[in-house]
Image (cartoon, grey):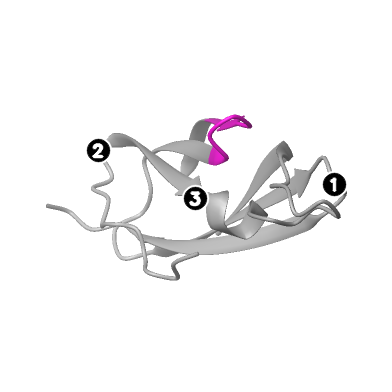
Amino acid sequence: MSDKPWAVKDPDEVKDYGLGWTDALAGQTEDDDDDVLASSEWIVTPDTITVDSDSFDAASATTTIWFSGGVIGVTYSCTNRVTTTGGRTYDWTKKLKIKSK
């Protein structure tokens, strides 16, 4: 899992950002099989950006969030908390900076 920030977002853009959980889930079960995403939630602070939607795909172990708006100069902390069918909980935080392009 990379801690590299997401690209800069202009406040007028509506864009999606995603995470791939394959590496974190690899070989995590008792039988050394890959665990599977069961749920995903996003915690975004501060709350001055609009979360238009979010989703996850268990088959590809990916999560996606769509943003619009945001305040120029603000860097948002975007934490994706996922749970797995094996009962594990993982958090992954990315930064998203708002800047006029």
Query: Disc 1 and disc 3: Cα gap in Å?
Result: 34 Å
Q: Which region of the structure is painted magenta?
A: 54-62
Q: Reading the chain from its start, which is encountered first: label 3 or label 2?
A: 2
Q: Please tell me which residue lies in front, 77 or 1.
A: 1
Q: Nearer the viewer, mark 1 or mark 3?
A: 1
Residue that numbered label 2 is attached to? 12
Residue at 50% from the left image edge and 64% from the top image edge:
1
Tell me the SS state at disc 2: loop
Residue at 47% from the left image edge and 62% from the top image edge:
94
Question: Residue 86 — which label?
Answer: 1
Q: Provide residue 41's location: percent of width, then percent of height.
A: 68, 43
Q: Identify the image quadrant of residue 97.
A: bottom left
* Above or below 4: residue 90: above
Q: Please tell me which residue lies in front, 69 or 84.
A: 84
Q: Reading the chain from its start, which is encountered first: label 2 or label 1?
A: 2
Q: Provide residue 92's location: percent of width, then percent of height.
A: 59, 61
Tell me the SS state at disc 3: loop
What residue type is disc 2 on?
Asp
Please state if 20 lies on the left or on the right of 81 as rendered. left
Query: Disc 2 and disc 1: Cα gap in Å?
Result: 40 Å
Residue that numbered label 3 is attached to? 48
